[in-house]
Amino acid sequence: MNRRVSYRDRLTAPLPQPRDLLRILREGGFRGSAANADRIPVLRTGLPELLPGAASWTWVGHSTYLVRIGGATVLTDPVWSARITGVPPRLTPPGLAWAELPKIDAVVISHDHYDHLDAPTIRRLPKDTPILAGLGLGRWFRRRGFAAVTELDWWESAEVAGLRFDFVPAHHWSRRGVRDTCASLWGGWVITAPDGMRTYHAGDSGYGHRFAEIGERYPGIEVAMLPIGAYEPPLVHAPGAHGPGRGGPRPGGRGRPAARVDALGHVRADPRTGRRAAGPDPQGLGRRGPRTGRPVGARRGAEQNPAGHMTGVVLDEDARTRLFDRFGPSVTSWCDELPALVDRLTGRWGIRVVGAMPGNTGRTLLCRDAAGRSVVLKLTPERDIAATEAAALRAWAGCSRVVDLIDTDLDAGALLLRGIVPGTPLDTIDGPLPLAAVGAMLGELASVTPPPDTFPSLARRVEFMFALAERRRRGSPGESRLPLPMLRRSRAAALELAHGGPVALLHGDLHPGNVLDGGPGNPAVLIDPRPCVGDPAFDAVDWAVLPLAEGEELTDGIDALREHLPTLDADRVRRWCACLAVLVAMGKLRRTGPDAHTDALLRLAP
C-alpha cells in the first residue's frame, strides 16, 4: 500500500495557526467548568439484550458508540478515560461501564486526535482485537502490540467479522504531537452488514460536499452517527472541524438531494462552560431523560415504522421536479397519491422504507423486508415502463449480472426487486472499472432471444431519446455548444443504423450509473433497463467512450471492451458512438458544463 508522508493535500480548510491559538488562550482558552456536573442525571442499566436479527447503536459518550449489527459488535473511537489531554474532564461517566462490554469484533478509529484515539482505553483491549484506521496510524497500534491492524485510504474497504468497512472522507485534519500534523489520514466509516443494513460513523467532520458523495456511493444508510453542536472557539470548530459552516452549500450540494437517514448526534459541550452546545436534536434524543447506556437506535424487521414509509422520503421536492421535467404537468396527481400507494404496497409486501434513490422515471425506494434483507420498491406513473422492465427482467432471469425481480403490481406501476449489496454505482467508484465483468454482462444480455411482440424496437428507442434531448436542449447550458443541425444529423444517422445489424434484447440505457457493485464475485449488476430489441452494439456505447474523459481515443475504449468480449462488432460500436456522442455530451453539459471531455465527444458527431 502506498504510504504518504503528509496528507495536507486532503485538507478542505486552513489549519489554525499559532497566532490563532494564542488568541483562543487570551479569550479564555479551553477551560471548562464542572460546577454543575452533579445536576446531570445519570442512570446506567447495562447493555440490553439484543434479539436475533436486530441491530443497535449504544452511545457511550462523545464519538464512542457500541454498534451491534450483522451479528458482530463494533466499537467506534473508544474513550473510557475520565480525562484526556487538552479538554475539560468528563462530566458524566461513560454510558456503559467497561465491564459491561461484550466481545469486540472490530474497532474503528476516525483520526488520531486525543478525544478519539485514547491510549489508556486502547491498552485495555485484547491485543488480538481487529483495528481499522486511516493510512499512517498502523504503526501507532503495532507499537502497542496489536497485530490485526488494517490501514485504509479514502474509498478503500476491508472485510472483518463478516462486515464490510469502507473508509470515507471527512472535512477535518489530524495531529497528536508537535511535528506530526496531517501525518495520518482522517475520515469516517461506512459499515455494511451481510444483509445490506448500513450505518455511517462520521468521526469529526465539518459540513461539505463529501456528505452528498458518501450518500451517492453508499445508498441506503439507515443510521448515521454525526458530530453536532460544537461551535466555540470558532477558530477550532470551523467548517473543517464539525461546525455547520458559514454560508456553506445546501444539504445534498450540487442540486442533489441529501440522503435521508436516522441521525444519532454525539452532542458536544462548549469547552469553556461545560454546557451542552445548541444544535440539532435528531430523533428527539435530547428529550430522553437520564443517560442510561441503552441503545439510541434499533432495528428489527418492520417494527421501526409500522406505516411503511419515512416522512419526506417517499417524494421530496427535488424528485417532484425531476418527474415534472420528464412527464409534464400530468404527473402532479400521481405525485399527490404516491404516499398512500407506498403505504398500500409496503403493507402488502411486508416491507418498510429506509431511504430513496434519485431517478427520472419514477421513485426508487430502498426498503427492508421482515427478515431485514435489502429490497427495492420501484414505482412509475407510466405503467408501460414498469411492464416492459418486468418483462425484460423475466427474460434475463438466470443471468447473474441482472438484478432479480421478486414481485410486481403492474396496475400500480410497481416492481419489487432484490437489493444489491454494497450497491455502489460504478460511475462513483475510484480506480479502474471491472471491464471483465462488464464484458460478461454485455455477453449475457446479447445471448437472450427477445420474446416476440413484447418490446419496442431500437428505432423507437432512438426516436424517443433524441426527441427528449431536443426538448431538454432548449434553454439548457448545452444549447450554445450543441447546434440543432448537429443533433438532427446524429438522429438521422442513428435511425439508419438502428434498422440494420443483429437483433438481441437490449438494456437501452446501460451507462455506468445503471450498473452497481454486487460485492465479491459479482462487481457489475445492471439495474433500470429501458428494454428494446435491436443491435447489441448499442449497449456498449457508454463504456466505449469512457477513455475520452482521460484524453485517450475511442479506439482505446473499444479495444478494452473487445479484450473481454471478442464477439463485439467494433465497427458498429464505433458508428453508434458517433451517432450517440451528442446525447452523452448533452447529459454532461447539463450536469457540469463544457470541458475537454464534452469537446472530444462532440468531435465524434456527424
Image: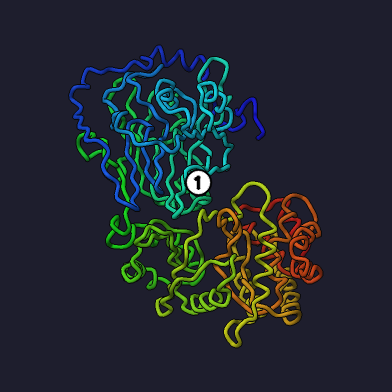
Up/down of 299 relative to 360, above or below: above
Residue farthest to the bottom? Answer: 453
Of residues 215 and 592, the one drawn nearer to the viewer in this rendering: 215
| Place of residue 230 in the rendered image (x, y in percent of width and height, measured from the top left) | 37, 30
| Place of residue 369 in the rendered image (x, y in percent of width and height, measured from the top left) | 37, 62
* Disc 1 secondary structure class: strand
- Residue 43 visible? The answer is yes
- In the picture, the quarter occupied by the N terminus is top right
* Residue indicated by mark 1: 164
Residue 495 figure quarter: bottom right
Q: Residues within 10 Å of mark 1 (few under 14, many from 20)?
A: some
Residue name at image x 50 percent, y 50 percent: 218
Of residues 296 and 554, the one drawn nearer to the viewer in this rendering: 296
Residue name at image x 60 percent, y 49 percent: 429
Residue name at image x 27 percent, y 44 percent: 49
What's the residue type where badge 1 is placed? Arg
Up/down of 431 relative to 487, above or below: above
Of residues 605 and 83, the one drawn nearer to the viewer in this rendering: 83
Task: Say how the picture is coloured.
Answer: rainbow
| Place of residue 493 in the rendered image (x, y in percent of width and height, measured from the top left) | 76, 75
Up/down of 22 relative to 250, above or below: above
